[in-house]
Image: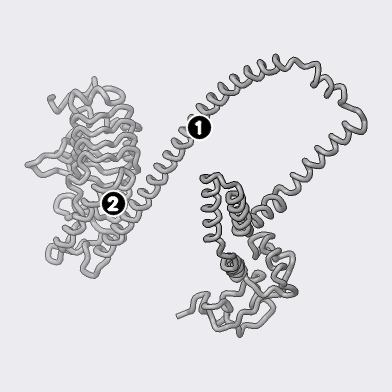
Amino acid sequence: MQNGPLNSPTNNSSSSGPDSNTTRPGLSSAGNSPGYGNGGYNPEPYNPESFSQGWADISDIRHTQTLGYQGNLQMATESMLEEVLRQRRDAVEARPNLTPLILIAIVLTLVGMILRLPWLGWVGAVMALVMSIRLIWPELRDISKELLVDKWGAPFIAFLGIGISIAATVQFTGFGDETIRFLRTGVNWDAVGAVGDTLGAVGQIFIAVLAVYIAWRQYIISKILTEQQNQLTIQQNMITQQQTIDAYFQGISDLVLDEEGLLEDWPQERAIAEGRTAAILSSVNADGKAKVIRFLARSKLLTPLKRDGHLGRAILDGKGGYEEDRIAGVRVIDIGVMLAKATLSRTDLRWIDLSEANLIYCDLRGADLVKSNLSRTILYGANLNSADIMGVRLHYGPVDTASPRSRTEAPNYTTGERTGTVVEDVDFTNVQRMSEEQRQYCCAWCGEKSRATIPGGCRDIKNQLGR
């Protein structure tokens, strides 16, 4: 077996060539990394241009300089972080244990305050202040370095320089003296106070409005977050559903492709396949149901196949497929009532063999049923609003002699008697691409309630159903 990238002989330390050990600065190759091979740790010399790609930020570079590393860097990013953490731990361990003394100083201060002994209070306060500053000095040093030097040092110095420059300009040039004198003597500060009170009231109103606005924005953000969480939940459910469907496909394929599989006449295996199908059709949404049905239909598992009378094996048709037998054929999986009252709206059901299935009260609004076989299917009370039924087979034989299926009498696939779809009380509103033959059959056998929904009307066609 060929080794993977981590164990490949081409990645160990014996490889040669200028590019055999090319890595980022401070990081070893896969073959030479500790724990992945037998090679030694041999990083490349320090390269200033690529150094920033292997390190966290400029503070790490300052840290390496304070530690005295020069020339070739001998530390990877992980080693650098470990070194920083070690230095911090050493600093904490080196900190003097002044906590008991501070507690004693606090007690002395409180006693001096209670007993009104100023000298005792001052001694305790000074001791507490000095030792507390000494105890938190490392943190104060880091904070002051981070804020006053690295981030806000330059802006603070800049504003201080601007202020000193303005003050010097006023003093040495006399510019602004009149303004200052006017502010001292000519301003009615009572009026200014009244204006200030007014502005304060306006400010309070503004703050109240701002608070309402912030609350409203928080509500909007919370709503958006909730919607995003719902979308994430829906996506997770879709992923879980797809995984379930894939497992079903694999299980059915294993049964079919077995040496004594479902295409041989083994009732127990076909019963297991039907049980799996019924379970998954009841646990997935409309798109999931459509995927399962398309898989079964294109795999010829829903089609009645002609079988050998002794062996039960499906018979080939001489054209690379299996021969159908609508009268005595055996289906690998019989849908039966699995889709009764199911929701299949706006799904892709093209070229699907659903003949003899029970789709009573099924929701097929907007579904794509192009070229599907619905002969002898029970569509009683189904909703086909805006569905595309171009080329859908509703019966066999001529439309004049075709009639819906019967519970007691066998179908005649020559004349079309008892081969048709049960279309009573079906809603045909806005049905798409209905042919003239389909219109005649539906008008004849759908009943008075459904005749009013068929595009084009049914005035010229007799109601054969009688109700």
Residue named by callout 2: 297
- 434 or 362: nearer the eye? 362
Q: Is residue 87 left or right of residue 406?
A: right
Q: Which residue is mark 1?
A: 217
Residue 252 % position (x, y): 26, 60
Query: Looking at the image, which is closer to me, 463 or 244?
Result: 244
Q: Amino acid at mark 1?
A: Arg
Which image quadrant for residue 462? top left
Residue at position x 79%, y 43% in the image: 158
Quadrant in which the N terminus appears: bottom left
Q: Would residue 443 be visible to someone looking at this image?
A: yes
As drawn, is 36 to the left or to the right of 397?
Answer: right
Residue 147 % position (x, y): 67, 50
Q: What label does residue 415 carry, if any?
A: none
Q: 402 or 14, which lies in front?
A: 14
Q: Is residue 77 visible?
A: no
Residue at point 78% right, 45% down?
A: 157
Which sits earlier in the primary sequence, circle 2 or circle 1?
Answer: 1
* Residue farthest along the right direction in this orientation: 173
In this orientation, which residue lies closer to the viewer: 351 or 278? Answer: 278
Q: Position of residue 272 (x, y in %)?
A: 18, 59
